[in-house]
Amino acid sequence: MVQAYLDDRYNPPPPLGAARPVRVRMIPESAVIADAQGFTAPYRIDGLPQGSYVVQALADVDGNFSSLSPLETPTSGDLVGALGDTGSSPAVLTGVGNATGKDVALWTRVTADPPGFEIDPATPAQMPADQSSPVRFALRPRPLAFLAGWTAAPQFAVQLIRDPGGAPVDSDHDGLADVWPRVFLVRLDPSDPTRLTQYRSPDLRSTRRQVISAAVDPTPFLPALQPQPGGNAPPVLTDRLTIVVRPALFDASTPGAPPDRLPSLQPGPYKIVLVSQSGQVWEIPNASGSAALDLAVVCPASASACAPGTVQTQSQSEAFQVGPPGHAARSGGIAGTLSVAGNPLTAYVFAYATNALPPFGRPISAAFHTGAEFQGGSVSYVLPDLPAGEYAVTAVVDMRGDFAAWPALLALAPGAGNLMTDASTVRVDTTFVSLNLSPARVLPQRPSFELLDPSGNPATADVNLEFSGRPDASFLIKPVAILGSGVAALRPDSAGGFALACDGTGKPVGNSLEIELVKVGDAAGLVPRIDGLGKATVIFATLDARQFSAGTCIPGSLHLVANAVAALTSGSAKVSLTDSSIPPVAIPVEAGRYAVVITSIAKQVWRIPNELQPALLDAGALLATPDPTRSLLQTQQVAVIVMP
């Protein structure tokens, strides 16, 4: 089989995209001629409009290819190739008008079946049409018994996507390194009960390609995917993918043109398309799903055993669902101009309720803009549909190419060189409030760190903090580049450091680094323990000022501390973690397990334990992670055990 795809950088064929071929030519077995190298077969593709095309070919060795989804993809043992493919790199050649002598060599043998998958029912794949922040859901492999000869226990193969120079890429500008499998959420036509028809616009009377931004969360895999001695790391095989979905809908229907962002999400089903590095594609819903079959051959989902001739494929008719708005439209909002000096890559504006502030509060609304949207250093932003209330508005401008709104680990600690505004307080009623923003604060090194044991070595297990009846206790911390080259794919940190203010006498100000110990209630140490009054137990700490008595710095500048330092506790209280207007209530020190949360002078936040701890990484990725990186990540699982 030979397929011709339109050469479109914005909608490429697999493995970089999920474009459909313009024309397909099936070559019958009778036309195949065996020779000493294998076989040859003549092909001809007619009816192509004038333009440039990518030509790919497939030899169906096992005889199970079909033009019907989900079987229209290579399977284990098949041979694949592309016009211009030398066998060492997926080069692409194009043809314009009539072209002859365009031979395709099938250099690559596919080594695995594409993993059929389903949505993990524990993580519903849905969001309301007025969603303002990313949502997550999980996929898991789904072996399908009716596909004879296919792998009984399929797995996903996760690998970094790299440019021709070998560097990781971030094509969707979400601040996370792109990985295979690639994910596309494509709008379906709600009028089709089989869920197999792409959305057709009733106004334009044409099929439209409308896509919601989505990607595989690379965080659990990154430490295993970095280049290692001898070359790049092999793919990580896993039985679970977490998909991060940004609430943004794009129309990519115009060939050769960049996608247009639509004003809002549109309710309805969206098919989930997964494209692997090998170019294999699986999507749900597909033609094997129960919604596309005769009811007589469908085995009930609740049945423990199925009658002969029936199949249990309800999972193959599932889709990502955008529901109606979660509330009636509100007329209040915030809008303005975001102005930046320099060349921003992306920019975010966040609105937090003033009683739900970060790092523990989540934004009520967010606006996202790419650097290409800036004109003359400015872009207009809108935070619509806000309930009446008071908001803290802040902006982060990514000048490095690695700021991500998710996970919290990255969202709360933008890297050095990015720009940020101080929070502006805005009161919203039933109309729009104007607020112009000019991020000018250049962020210092993020305050990533590790705890040290009493001997001064990096702690990889919880550290005891003994008060022994005293009012205070001390512990050791050290700034470390946790997001270094062994972990961060895009813009790794080269060094760790705590940025401190320098007073008028030339001494570093220890309390310019905020330190809090927050009592946690879960095994991972990510969830604060909240009492019946909605308050957490917090022990306050600051850097011991005595260790800076001999230090010198330039008054008014930032002083970077790169060595281990001692922190001294300074009281305990019941605290609202999100509403700073509620005064703390002092209490005696409570025993328990505490996370350590450090906030820099520029309001960057790093905490341990965090999402990089080994227990939260993919199990296969952890096994493949080099020992030095694994040891580093073990420091991110450490908490403090307080002993009054």
Image: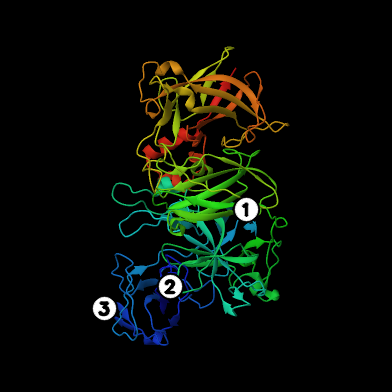
Q: Which residue is mark 1?
A: 123
Q: Is residue 599 above or below residue 364?
A: above
3 or 2: tag closer to the N-terminus:
3
Residue 440 in the image, given as x and y percentages of width and height? 44, 42
Mark 1: amino acid: Thr
Residue 547's quadrant in the figure? Answer: top left
Between the residue at mark 3 and the residue at mark 2, the CA separation in whole angstroms equals 42 Å
Q: Name which residue lies at 58% across and 27% down.
A: 593
The label number, if any, that marks residue 68 in the structure image: none
The label number, if any, that marks residue 36 in the structure image: 3
Q: Is residue 17 above or below residue 637?
A: below
The quarter of the image holding the C terminus is: top right
Residue 421 in the image, given as x and y percentages of width and height? 50, 42
Camera-side mark, 1 or 3: 1
Q: How many marks?
A: 3
Return the residue nearer the eye: 150 or 208: 208
Return the residue nearer the eye: 187 or 502: 502
Q: Which residue is mark 2?
A: 256
Examine the rendering and report whether any part of residue 236 can be seen. Answer: yes
Q: Name which residue lies at 44% across and 81% down.
A: 24
Mark 2: amino acid: Gly
Between the residue at mark 1 and the residue at mark 2, the CA separation in whole angstroms equals 36 Å
Camera-side mark, 1 or 2: 2
Residue 73 in the image, given as x and y percentages of width and height? 47, 71
Mark 3: amino acid: Ala
